Image (spheres, grey):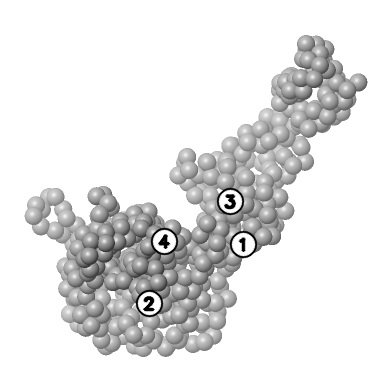
């Protein structure tokens, strides 16, 4: 990027809420079911039907409002956003215009170890539209699936506070982990549970902001990064060539890695917003707002800071654990209730456990591993009852089967030998059999020590306590 320029990024993020039913009818809110099976006269917009607001949607949105430090508008309304598109049978979307449920908040993100505050303009509730299927069996025509009509959404609008694609990515990842901590969205990117529109402008440093473009169809965080980088280069090139940037909506084509103009940008008045006459004013009492606030758990950014500052984890490890609510809860239980050492618990989570989850495609909850069992296993290793290598063997079993660890240690004969006289006898035997190594150690080749300890471990079939073994060998070599 040309150093004279600065990029300004704002994001509009849509998250599908994981309520049981849709926002204005009792149809199930489900993904991946047969087309047009969860539909009714209300979500198909048949004439004469009336919507009823699902209270759970309001609760979920208020929770997100609290998590993003917003002001909650206890009295607000819903509005019609009018536009025509074949996936929208009503020809308007029920959304919120001038009074959103939540506004004026912020979220702190971490980029390269630095904390940065991003303003949140507003969070409002709205309904999703259906989906067009460009079926090949009906050549030249498209079909529509209305299952998604009326799926509840929150739209989270940020202030134009981001100055790089890395900040945008960190912001999106933070929102995603907050949504999963609050358990209000399944966060399945591949199913479109989180989607975003990206606003980008560039300007020469020290001059007013430039004209922004809005990019649609950004379906993954990595696409957002590529889209932003493409768009900033394109705009700078236009300005450098003496052209102007046109305010418009562009479509991101991730396969080709380019953005293409869709239409010159509409303004809000083009949607002819007006208050939705079929729904009551939303009024939430203060007690409810406070109850929902009390349900907000410790959030990822706070967790990262606690892991780094209080538990001494490296920032990168802390971030990986904290951004995944399952890993974080598991880690907290191991270290808080179980009393496992944070560094050791983190090593297991980021090492063998993550490896197993990646290889099997399972979530932690789908394994047989519990924080209690993991803590117990770590305890046996820390007390030298078993070696780390034996611990890994046991891990491979208990992650897939519900078996008692103590019995596995006995059945597999993994208990370490920590009996001094037994280890001394073993050392004597190995030293006697390896005269040349003993001699070279005494001649200053200290790496012979590792070889001799290794031979002892081998002779004990890995069961000798390696720390004690090393001490005994050293002592004997010194004699
Ligand atoms: Zn319905």
**Can residue 79 be seen in the rendering of this structure?**
yes
Query: Looking at the rendering, which quadrant does residue 99 occupy?
Result: bottom left
Indicate which disc, 4 or 1, sits on the residue closer to the N terminus: 4
Callout 3 touching callout 2 (CB < 8 Å): no
The label nearer to you, 4 versus 1, is 4
**Can residue 248 be seen in the rendering of this structure?**
no
Q: CA distance from mark 4 to mark 3?
A: 23 Å
Helix or strand or loop: what does disc 4 sit on? loop
> Where does label 3 land, which residue?
317
Q: Where in the figure is residue 174, as x and y percent of width and height?
A: 48, 62
**Mark 2: few/some/many CA within 10 Å (<14, 14-19, 20+):** many
> Where does label 2 land, which residue?
124
Helix or strand or loop: what does disc 3 sit on? helix
The label nearer to you, 4 versus 2, is 4
Query: Looking at the rendering, which quadrant does residue 83 occupy?
Result: bottom left
Residue 160 shown left or right of residue 365 in the figure? left
> Where does label 1 land, which residue?
305
**Mark 3: few/some/many CA within 10 Å (<14, 14-19, 20+):** some
Q: Nearer the viewer, residue 129 or 19?
A: 129
């Amino acid at each position: 990027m040309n150093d004279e320029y600065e990029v300004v990024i704002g994001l509009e993020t849509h998250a599908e809420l994981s309520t049981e039913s849709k926002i204005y009818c009792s149809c199930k809110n489900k993904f991946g079911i047969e087309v047009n099976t969860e539909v009714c006269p209300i979500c198909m917009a048949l004439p004469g039907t009336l919507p009823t607001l699902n209270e759970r949607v309001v609760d979920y949105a208020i929770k997100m409002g609290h998590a993003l430090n917003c002001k909650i508008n206890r009295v607000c309304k819903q509005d019609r956003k009018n536009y025509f598109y074949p996936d929208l049978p009503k020809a308007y979307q029920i959304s919120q215009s001038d009074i959103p449920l939540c506004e004026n908040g912020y979220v702190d993100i971490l980029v390269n170890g630095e904390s940065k505050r991003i303003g949140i303009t507003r969070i409002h509730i709205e309904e999703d539209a259906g989906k067009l299927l460009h079926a090949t069996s009906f050549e030249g025509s498209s079909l529509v699936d209305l299952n998604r009509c009326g799926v509840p959404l929150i739209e989270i609008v940020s202030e134009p506070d981001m100055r790089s694609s890395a900040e945008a990515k960190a912001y999106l990842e933070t929102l995603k982990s907050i949504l999963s901590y609050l358990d209000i969205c399944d966060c399945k990117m591949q199913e479109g549970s989180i989607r975003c529109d990206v606003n980008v402008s560039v300007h020469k440093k020290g001059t007013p902001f430039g004209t922004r473009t809005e990019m649609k169809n950004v379906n993954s965080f990595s696409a957002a990064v590529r889209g932003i980088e493409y768009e900033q280069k394109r705009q700078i090139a236009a300005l450098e060539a003496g052209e102007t940037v046109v305010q418009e909506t562009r479509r991101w084509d991730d396969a080709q890695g380019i953005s293409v103009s869709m239409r010159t940008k509409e303004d809000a008045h083009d949607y002819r917003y007006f208050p939705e006459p079929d729904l009551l004013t939303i009024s939430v009492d203060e007690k409810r707002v406070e109850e929902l606030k009390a349900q907000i758990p410790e959030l990822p950014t706070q967790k990262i800071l606690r892991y780094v500052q209080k538990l001494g984890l490296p920032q990168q490890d802390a971030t990986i654990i904290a951004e995944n609510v399952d890993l974080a809860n598991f880690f907290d239980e191991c270290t808080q209730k179980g009393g496992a050492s944070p560094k050791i618990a983190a090593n297991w989570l980021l090492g063998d456990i993550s490896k197993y989850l990646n290889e099997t495609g399972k979530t932690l909850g789908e394994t047989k591993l519990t924080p209690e069992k993991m803590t117990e296993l770590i305890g046996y290793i820390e007390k030298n009852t078993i070696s780390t290598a034996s611990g890994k063997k046991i891990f491979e079993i208990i992650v897939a089967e519900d078996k008692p660890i103590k019995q596995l240690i006995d059945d597999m004969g993994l208990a370490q030998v920590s009996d001094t006289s037994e280890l001394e006898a073993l050392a004597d035997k190995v030293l006697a059999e390896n005269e040349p190594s003993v001699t070279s150690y005494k001649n200053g080749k200290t790496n012979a020590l590792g070889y001799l300890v290794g031979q002892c471990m081998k002779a004990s079939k890995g069961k000798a306590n390696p720390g004690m073994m090393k001490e005994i060998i050293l002592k004997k070599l010194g004699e």
